[in-house]
Image (cartoon, rainbow, N blue to C red):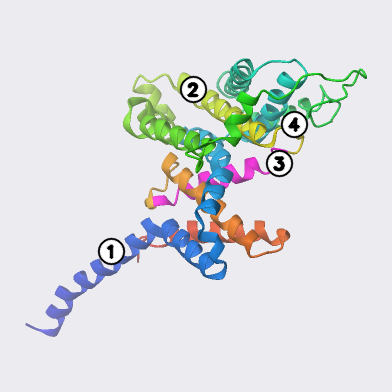
Amino acid sequence: MTNSAQHTSENPRGGNGLETVRETIRRGAVFILLIALVVGFSLAQPAFININNLMSILQAVSVVAIIGAGVTVTLAIGGFDLSVGAVAASSVMAASYAMIVLGLNAYQTVPLVLAFGALVGFANAFLIVKLKVPDLLATLSSMFLLTGLQLIPTAGRSISVGLILPDGTTATGKYDPAFLTIGRSSLFGTIPFSVLMMLLVALILFVLTERTRLGRLLYATGGNEVATRLAGANVNRIKTFAYVLSGTLAALGGIIVAARVGRGDVSSGASLLMDSVAASLIGFAVLGLRRPNVLGTLIGAVFVGVLLNGLTMLNAPYYTQDFIKGAVLVGALALTYGIGRTQN
């Protein structure tokens, strides 16, 4: 056999081996970085790996994961919901107002706030589907509207027991203990209830998006809306469903925040939009799927939570944390999209 023949027979094997390594790195990039973070933080600060701290991380990211799951559904249809942070923040205020000012109990407040989130999602869908306003502009407008609207009933004050209303009277209501259990209770004294809710939402949406006809239609709409419509699917209903679901999940996130902190803080939703979007985008890199997916969003939320918790335990300056979070996000996406591309 000549040298040229030997090279011809060996190169494909070598090339295939290299491609296998690249594909493995691409598909596992987020997991590799996540493991590296956990090991690094554990070595630098042994208390990081403590079970209570790990549960604290999951509890902290539960709201981000739930809201991010809604964002993921809108990304699947080729849209984007920028109003989720404002919906969550408004839901915190709405839940607090309902109990402290209106005197409602948990069983009245929770459905009311979820209905509020669904209504905002429906309004977004109306702007996008019926009025043909671009997704980003429609949801951005809703974000500004809600950010201002939540401040009006209390004249910009946070809501807590004994709130002085704009007319000079004092609110006489209080938080329902049953409501507070949503954000403060735990299973067996170890697993926070909010973490269980996060896992339940993730499981339901994973089955919905990955194992049902509706899920296939969601991705089909995002991939080629015209073809999906010509195939007989009602694209307008699919889009409406996505935005209503996103608004409802954002409201659920707000309920959990309100139940955890026990007050309606006007700044409670400040970082929820960016963190939920970051989780959704990191989700693109999970298993190299390169598309929005609920499992990836859950992993992305945990990824962000581990990173921020570790930086906090290491006393990293707060003003560097967003930069580091962005750098790691860029790294995860670069590994996913940059490795394994077609070689010339």
Q: Secondary structure at mark 1?
A: helix
**Residue drawn at the location 51% of the way across and 65% of the way down:** 42
Q: Nearer the viewer, mark 3 or mark 2?
A: 3
Q: Which residue is mark 2?
A: 241
**Residue drawn at the location 42% of the way across and 48% of the way down:** 290
Tag 2: residue type?
Answer: Phe
Image coordinates for residue 339, horizontal then vertical, percent? 40, 62
**Residue drawn at the location 55% of the way across and 21% of the way down:** 129
3D distance between C-alphas at marks 3 and 4? 10 Å
Q: Which residue is mark 3?
A: 270
**Residue drawn at the location 54% of the way across and 51% of the way down:** 52
Q: Residues within 10 Å of mark 2 (few under 14, many from 20)?
A: some
Q: Quadrant of residue 11?
A: bottom left
Tag 4: residue type?
Answer: Thr
Mark 4 or 2, nearer chain start: 4
Image coordinates for residue 323, horizontal then vertical, percent? 65, 60
Q: Is residue 328 above or below residue 44?
A: above
Tag 3: residue type?
Answer: Ala
Q: Nearer the viewer, mark 3 or mark 4?
A: 3
Q: Which residue is mark 1?
A: 20
Residue at the far front in the pictured view: 188
| Viewer can see residue 193 | yes
Residues shaded magenta: 268-286
Residue sitting nearer the eye, 112 or 228: 112
Image coordinates for residue 255, horizontal then vertical, percent? 62, 29
Residue at the far left in the pictured view: 1
In the rendered image, residue 277 lying in the magenta stretch gets the answer: yes
3D distance between C-alphas at marks 3 and 1? 42 Å
Q: Which residue is mark 4?
A: 147
Q: Main secondary structure of the magenta part?
A: helix
Q: Are marks 4 and 2 in contact (CB under 8 Å)?
A: no
Q: Residues within 10 Å of mark 4 (few under 14, many from 20)?
A: many
